[in-house]
Amino acid sequence: MKIAIDIDGVLTDLELFMETEGEKFVGHPVVDHNGYDIDTKFNASKETKEAFWDAKFRDYIINAPFKDKVSEITNKLHEDGNEIFIITSRKWHPEYGFKTKEDMTAANLKSLRQANIYFDHYVEAPFPKVKETKDLKIDIFLEDNPTNVIELEKVTKVLLFDAFYNRHVNGKNIHRIH
């Protein structure tokens, strides 16, 4: 079986990072735990959101807090004969602290390896990852982003990693996991 896995919010604890680092950055506690990004979590401007990610994205990639047991899960999926695709929409911008896109990709791969995450293929794809999912004939996609999930369910089965910001999402091809 071909299984695609997103990084942010599935393998890493994106919520924890945003809420912990965001509070320090904006200077006040989270306003809306259901928010998906800094602007909605902290009722901040788009400019504040962009400044946060310009300042913190490199640190997030290099030191991302991986969720418990994700290494064991990816290794078990591999042992069971599945083909594992890491498909991420992480985008390179010069403001993010990496000189080139290749430097950012290398940092992504290094952090995955340091966390002992098993994968056969690494793919960088634009939101909502539908074209790559179809082209690669992915059977199951592990995802958390509400927009991506809604689009991905049209072309494959989705295991939705439960988070405050995606509790409103459901569908016939979406299966929520905790």
Image: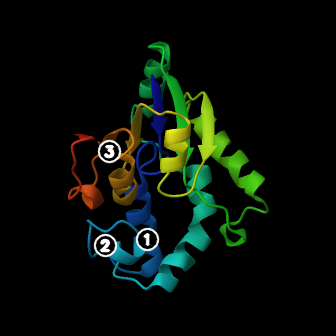
Helix, strand or loop status at disc 1: helix
The answer to whether 6 is drawn above or below residue 118 in the figure is below
How many marks on residues?
3
Q: Which quarter of the picture shows residue 118?
A: top right
In x, y percent, where is residue 20? Answer: 40, 64
Q: Which residue shows up at 50% across the image and 40% down it? A: 134
Q: Marks 2 and 3, Cα distance to the nearest angstrom?
A: 21 Å
Asked which colour scheme the image uses, the reply is rainbow
Mark 1, Cα crowd under 10 Å, few <14 / some 14-19 / many 20+, is many
Q: Which residue shows up at 31% across the image and 44% down it? A: 160
Q: Marks 3 and 1, Cα distance to the nearest angstrom?
A: 22 Å
Q: Contact, CB < 8 Å: mark 2 with mark 1? A: yes
Helix, strand or loop status at disc 2: loop
- The one nearer the camera, 69 or 102, is 102
Viewport quadrant of the N terminus: top left
Q: Which residue shows up at 70% across the image and 66% down it? A: 97
In x, y percent, where is residue 36? Answer: 36, 65
The tag earlier along the polypeptide, 2 or 3, is 2
Q: Marks 2 and 1, Cα distance to the nearest angstrom?
A: 8 Å
Q: Name the residue beneath numbered marker 1.
A: 22
Helix, strand or loop status at disc 3: strand
Classify residue 118 as left or right of residue 33.
Answer: right
Q: Name the residue beneath numbered marker 3.
A: 161
**Residue 130 is at least partly visible in this image:** yes
Q: Name the residue beneath numbered marker 2.
A: 30
Q: Which quarter of the picture shows residue 44?
A: bottom left
Residue type at mark 3 is Phe
Residue type at mark 1 is Gly
**Residue 178 is at least partly visible in this image:** no
